[in-house]
Structure formats: structure tokens, C-alpha cells
Image: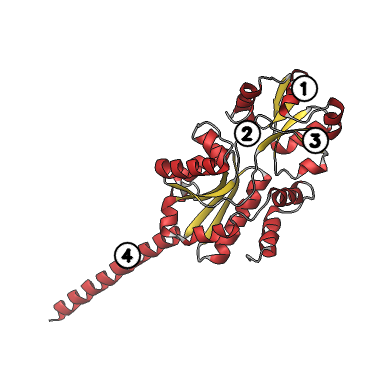
Amino acid sequence: MGRIMILCSLLLLTAIVAGCGTSGGGASQSAAGDTIVVGSKNFTEQIIVGHMMADLIETHTDLKVVRQLNLGGTNVCFEGIKKGSSNNGIDIYMDYTGTGLVDILQMEPTTDPDEAYGTVKKEYKDKWNLVWLEPWGFNNTYTLAVKEDFANKSNIETFSDLGKIADQLVLGCSMEFVERPDGYPGLKEKYGFEFKNVKSMDTGVRYPAIDNDEVQVIDAFATDGLLVSHNLKILEDDKHFFPPYYAAPLVRGDVLEKHPEIADVLNKLANSITDEDMQKLNYQIDGEGKNAADVAKEFLKSRGLL
């Protein structure tokens, strides 16, 4: 009888330990599943909106957020989101409709913003189960910029005007712009001009370079904060080469299936940030030296979202 009692006790203890092991594994899986990794590309605007997305998720959900910001260019972030956080990748980052359409999908550009958004939304879901949420409002399209006084002296208003003297000028631009089909290669084909030289450089270096006349033309984003402070003129894309680049959160489909509240939270900023808003936010970092995390938080507070 004593042996039976001991045996029963051992079996009960084994069951409890096994049960604890299962419970512990479940809790570990749950904790991992409840952590969202937010990424960003490696320029000011991306780091700002990366902080915004992370702040919104932290404030309005029970999820934990890991910030993997300033990762690199488009391909780095895109490969990261395809892998997902369970494979040392990311779950969310902000991308641009024109980038998705031309750079990732390798499709012909369109000047219709709704068409661009509809196409990337469908293709990304079908190909990779990645979901484009609602655009936040600003259109960070590529453009070309020159000094104001140079534009006035040379009577330059448009890309076509620039093309008449492009062979005498040096273009300073990002490495991505040199290589992307919606960058310099496509621009040359569309407008039929070529610069005297092209210097690839980090985005922040372009402005001192044009100030010092090391280059006479730079690629820029329409929301760049430094365009105003450096007295640069944005030229008109008169043949409408650059597609619309409306910014929208890109999220893994499996993450949204498990946490649909993420869409509701990030859509709180849908169609609410203008180009001018974003330009001012960028300038606070690039022109005034403020911290991107602080700028993002203050903006969300000003909108009553924190």
C-alpha cells in the first residue's frame, strides 16, 4: 500500500512538472507573439514615422514594441518584413506607393495615386501576404532641386529646362537614386538628358555639397525640411516621370490576423499629415538638431493621440 501511495505521488508530481513545462512554453510563445518589431529606412522622415508607429502601438494596445529603426534602404526593410520578427526581421515599416510599384514590383509608374495604391495593395497581399494600411496623407515624391539664385539666373523652372544645360552640371544623389528604375536611369530615358557627372552620397551630405557648389543639382524628397533652409528651388516634373509616393504603414498579414487592432491604431493618422507638416517635422531634426523620438512624440500629443 505504501509503495502504491509513493508511486501515485510520483506520477502526480510528474504530471504537475509536465503541466508547468507546457504552461511555461505557452507563456513564452505568447510573449514572443505579443512583441511587434517596427523598422524604418535610414533617413530622417522614416525614423520619425517609425517612432510614431511604435508610440501609437505602445499607447493604444497591450503589445510590446521593439524599435529597429535606421536599418538601411528599401531592399533591407523589404527583405526584413518578408522574414518577420520570428526570423530576425521586422513586422512593420512605412513605405511609399511609388517605391512599391516601381522599385519592388518592377511595374510601370502611374501618375494616379489611387491606381498606384490599389496596385501595390493587391500585389503585395497576393505575393507576400503583406498589407498596406491607409496612407497617412503626405506624398514624399522624388524631385530635383537647384539653388534659387542659380534657377533665376539660368531661367530654370522645369526638368525640361534643366535638361538644356544638364551636360554642364553635376548631380549629387543617393545611391538608391542612381540605381532605381524610378530614379536616374528612368529619368534619363524619359527626358533624354544626361548630367556631366553623377556623385552618389549620403542624403545628409547633398545639402552641404550643393551649398559649396560641389554639385549643382540634387535629388530630393518633396518633404525634405532642408529645402527651405538651404534656399533651394524644387523643379517641376513637367513630363510627370515620378510616380506618387504616398506613405503608408506596411504590415505582415499574419501579424494583422493575430492583432487586428494594429490596423485601427495606425489608421488613426490616415490622410491627416500634409507635405508641409512632414517638411516641418523633418526640419526640426535636420535643421534644428532635435531628437527624432521627441519630435514624433510631441506631434502625436499635438493631435491628441498620446
Q: Secondary structure at mark 2?
A: loop
Residue tagged 4: 22
Question: Which residue appears at 84% of the width and 29% of the height?
Answer: 150
Judged by depth in the image, the label closer to the viewer, 4 or 2, is 2
Q: Secondary structure at mark 1?
A: loop
Q: Secondary structure at mark 3?
A: helix
Q: Quadrant of residue 218?
A: top right
Residue tagged 1: 169
Counting residues from the N terminus, which is met first, the one under dot 3 or under dot 4?
4
- In front here: 105 or 30? 105
Counting residues from the N terminus, which is met first, the one under dot 1 or under dot 2?
1
The three-letter amino acid code for the residue at tag 4 is Thr
The three-letter amino acid code for the residue at tag 1 is Leu
Q: Is residue 69 left or right of residue 228?
A: left
State the quadrant of the C terminus. bottom right
Counting residues from the N terminus, which is met first, the one under dot 1 or under dot 4?
4
State the quadrant of the N terminus. bottom left
In the picture, the disc for residue 242 is: 2
Task: Judge the density around disc 4: few (<14), some (14-19), many (≥20) Cα neighbours within 10 Å.
Answer: few
The reply to whether callout 3 and callout 4 are in contact (CB within 8 Å) is no
Residue tagged 3: 208
Farthest bottom residue in view: 1
x and y percentages locating residue 282 in the rendered image: 72, 48
The three-letter amino acid code for the residue at tag 3 is Pro
